[in-house]
Image: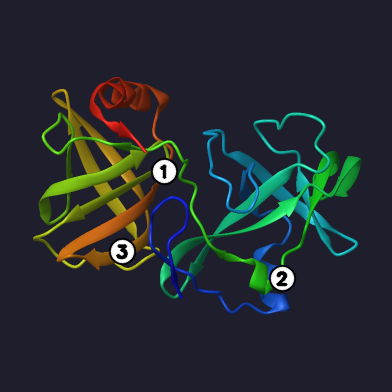
Amino acid sequence: MDQTPLNGEKLMWRYPGWTEKDLEIILSPGHCLELVPRRVFEPHTDHKIRKAQILGVHDGDLVLSLPEPPLPTPLLGQPLEVTFLHKGKNGVIRYGYYTLILDTFKTFASRSGAVPAVVVLFPREKDISPTNLRSSQRFRPPQTGDLCLVTKGVDQCRIEDLSFRGIRFSYEEGPVPPEEGAPLDLTLQFNEKQAKLSGIITNRFQNQGRWEICLELKPMGLGLWSDLLVILHGVAINL
């Protein structure tokens, strides 16, 4: 089923088809997660993606290390989108599900010793769907502006929107882009500078004869993002 979420990107919502045993392996102790503090359908406005490690299972729920950077207190009842990367036959795709912080432990017996922890829902397969870490604060630079984007085989890409953790761009003439889940490298040119960006393709589709690609970016340096904001705040449309 083709749906368009709040961020405007078209995603093919594919349930991964995992069994309960698959989930026990994927969400086993030691695996790292990225947490987004938001409810279902709530926009992501916080650049501070939290990280946590799976410590174990308690009464059928998932026990995590305390999120870093820390969440505001009190922790109990705070909404979270729990996300993780999984490599399947189509490449690496980010999946996520929504939960609340159900409980807290002052100490939880983990592999690395007794540590403070939080408890979240252990998901069912139907709770999980593809997602990304893009924030809701996005910018659409003018096509005649100072930003230029190139990628392998394409000399001129049009930036549809740009944010701290993602980019959506399109082109008319060029190769068929890699499948979803594949890595992709980009070069962003501005103010006589060049910045290398890389990430994972979260979606690709054709729109009126143009290829449109959505990319979840690896975290860019704050210095680079600050330089970009100087340009974007001056000329771009804040979506």
Front label number (2 vs 1): 2
How many angstroms separate mark 2 from mark 3 (CA)?
A: 27 Å
**Residue type at mark 3?**
Arg
Quarter occupied by residue 21:
bottom right
Q: Say which mark, if any, is on residue 124.
A: 2
The image shows residue 4, relative to residue 2, as above or below, that is above
The secondary structure type at the circle numbered 1 is loop
Which mark is drawn over residue 204? 3
Cα separation, mark 2 vs mark 1, equals: 28 Å
Q: Nearer the viewer, residue 3 or 108?
A: 3
Say which residue label 1 marks. Answer: 218
Which residue is at a point 85% across and 65% down the rendered structure image? Answer: 60
Q: Earlier in the sequence, mark 2 or mark 1?
A: 2
Looking at this view, is 24 or 97 the one in front?
97
Mark 2 and mark 3 lie on one chain; the one further toward the N terminus is: 2
Q: Amino acid at mark 2?
A: Arg
Q: In front: 80, or 152?
A: 80
Task: Name the residue type under label 1.
Answer: Lys
**Upstream in sequence: badge 1 or badge 3:** 3
Q: Residue at x 44, y 75 (%)?
A: 89
